Amino acid sequence: MAKPLLILDHGVMKKILLTALMIPCLASASNWVFVTKNKAGKSYFIDTQSIQKSGDFVTFSDKVNNASRDEFGDLSSKNNVTINCGTKELNFRYHATYSEIDNQGKPTSTFAAPDSKTWQPIDPDTENESLMKFVCKK
C-alpha cells in the first residue's frame, strides 16, 4: 500500500481552504471613500485602491449616489476617469448606471471609450474639482 506524500491535520487544511477561498475576494476589494456632495444631493466617492498615477495623469474609479432617481430611473453610477493634474482636465473612459444605490441592482446603461482623446476642462467649485484635488494631492 502506497504512503501518502503529505498528511495535514484538520486545522491546517481548514486554513489552506479558507485562504484559497479569500484570494478572489481580495483581488476585487474596493475602498470607497466619500469625497463630496453637490447641491443636488449627489454623493461622490473614490475607490482609493483603483488610483493609478503616471506623471501628471491619475486614473481612478468613482461612484455617484443620487439623492433620488434621475430622469432614467437610476440611483447610482460608476465611472473610470483619467485626470491630468497639470492641465486640470478630465477624460471619462467608462460610465455605467445602476438602478439601485451603491452600484447595486440592474446595470441600466454603459459607455466605454478607453482610447478617448476628448479632454474636458475641470471647472472651479464643482464636484470634478473636488475629485481632482483628492487624487492629485501629493
Image (tube, grey):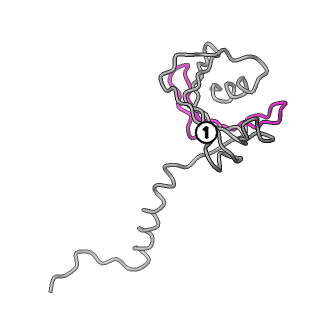
Residues rendered magenta in the picture: 35-62
**Position in image of residue 12 (x %, y %):** 41, 73
Q: Nearer the viewer, residue 75 or 10?
A: 75
Q: Is residue 132 left or right of residue 59?
A: right
Q: How many numbered marks have been drawn onto this rendered protein structure?
A: 1
Residue 105 vs 59, above or below: the answer is below
Viewport quadrant of the N terminus: bottom left
Judged from this view, the residue extending furthest toward the left is: 1
Q: Residue at x 30, y 78 (%)?
A: 7
Judged from this view, the residue extending furthest toward the right is: 39
Residue 105 vs 5, above or below: the answer is above
Q: Is residue 7 left or right of residue 74?
A: left
Judged from this view, the residue extending furthest toward the front is: 72
The stretch drawn in magenta includes residue 43: yes
**Position in image of residue 17 (x %, y %):** 42, 68
Residue 91 vs 100, above or below: the answer is above
Judged from this view, the residue extending furthest toward the bottom is: 1
Q: Nearer the viewer, residue 97 or 6?
A: 97
Q: Is residue 118 left or right of residue 6?
A: right
Q: Residue at x 45, y 70 (%)?
A: 15
Tell me the residue that label 1 is attached to. 48
**Position in image of residue 92 (x %, y %):** 59, 25
Residue 28 vs 64, above or below: the answer is below
Q: Residue at x 55, y 38 (%)?
A: 50
- Classify residue 71 by image quadrant: top right
Q: What SS does tag 1 mark?
A: helix
Q: Is residue 106 left or right of residue 5?
A: right
| Residue type indicated by callout 1 | Thr
- Classify residue 83 by image quadrant: top right
Magenta stretch secondary structure, dominant:
strand
Q: Residue at x 52, y 16 (%)?
A: 117
